[in-house]
Amino acid sequence: MDIFFTLLLVICTAFLALYTRRLWSATTSLVTGAADTAQKQLRAYVCVSSAKISFEIAGAPEVQVVLKNCGQTPAHDLRCWIHIWIENYPLKVVLPVPPSDFPMAVSVLEPGGHLLSAIKKDPPVRPCALALLGTPQGTVYVYGQVTYKDVFSVERITKYRLIYGGNEPVQSQHMMPDSEGNEAT
């Protein structure tokens, strides 16, 4: 009879040990998932909030891109660049980017904060090509990159490419996202 109870006790202990291990594993997965979710909720998210084009000087379109931190924590060590290019639509060329040692200011963008980035076409568009601006033959591309660190010191990158023209008729001063060239980490 003692052997029966001892064997029963060994079986119950083994069952409890296996069940405890499964609970430990499930709890570890929950904690890891919660930490990942917290990081996604708390980090900075810098994105394009709006972009407008104006033609105050003939042949020199000026674009203002508003970047916004949509996250809940500041974006640190923020650096960005912007460029304007006029080309056929759809784009069949590689757009130029600045060299890796291109000097950029470093700033902090608080949660909900905005940063205005502006560029003017220089040299201006030739007078004979002005009528093509905003058409598939003269689509205005404005593109750039924002690099920053989130509160967890992870470097994040937002790349954007906006168009004025393309296949859609131009109806306002708002620039629209292109079908390619927009990504974020």
Image (cartoon, rainbow, N blue to C red):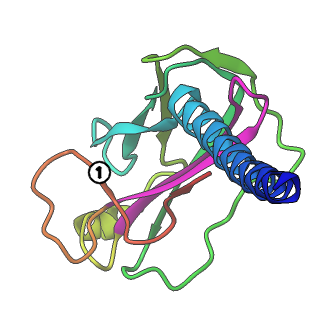
At numbered mark 1, what does the secondary structure look like: helix, strand or loop? loop
Residue 145 within the magenta-colored segment of the rendering: yes
Q: Is residue 179 above or below residue 162?
A: below
179 or 81, which is in the foreground? 179
Residue that sits furthest to the bottom in the current view: 92
Q: State the residue at coordinates (47%, 41%).
A: 120
Magenta segment: 139-163
Q: State the residue at coordinates (73%, 52%).
A: 12
54 or 7, which is in the foreground? 7
**Quadrant into which the N terminus falls:** bottom right
Tell me residue 59's x, y (percent).
36, 51
Q: Is residue 61 above or below residue 179?
A: above
Residue 85 within the magenta-colored segment of the rendering: no
Main SS of residues in magenta: strand
**Which residue position is annotated with label 1?**
175
Q: Hey, which quadrant is residue 64 in on the image?
A: top left
User: What amino acid type is highlighted by mark number 1?
Assistant: Met
Q: Is residue 67 above or below residue 135?
A: above
Q: State the residue at coordinates (48%, 48%).
A: 121
Tell me residue 50's x, y (percent).
32, 37
Left or right of 125: which side holds 57?
left
Tell me residue 98's x, y (percent).
75, 53
112 or 144, which is in the foreground? 112
Tell me residue 54's x, y (percent).
28, 40
Q: State the residue at coordinates (63%, 76%).
A: 94
Residue that sits furthest to the front in the current view: 1
Graded by Cα atoms within 10 Å as few (under 14), some (14 to 19) or many (20 or more), the crowding at tag 1 reads many
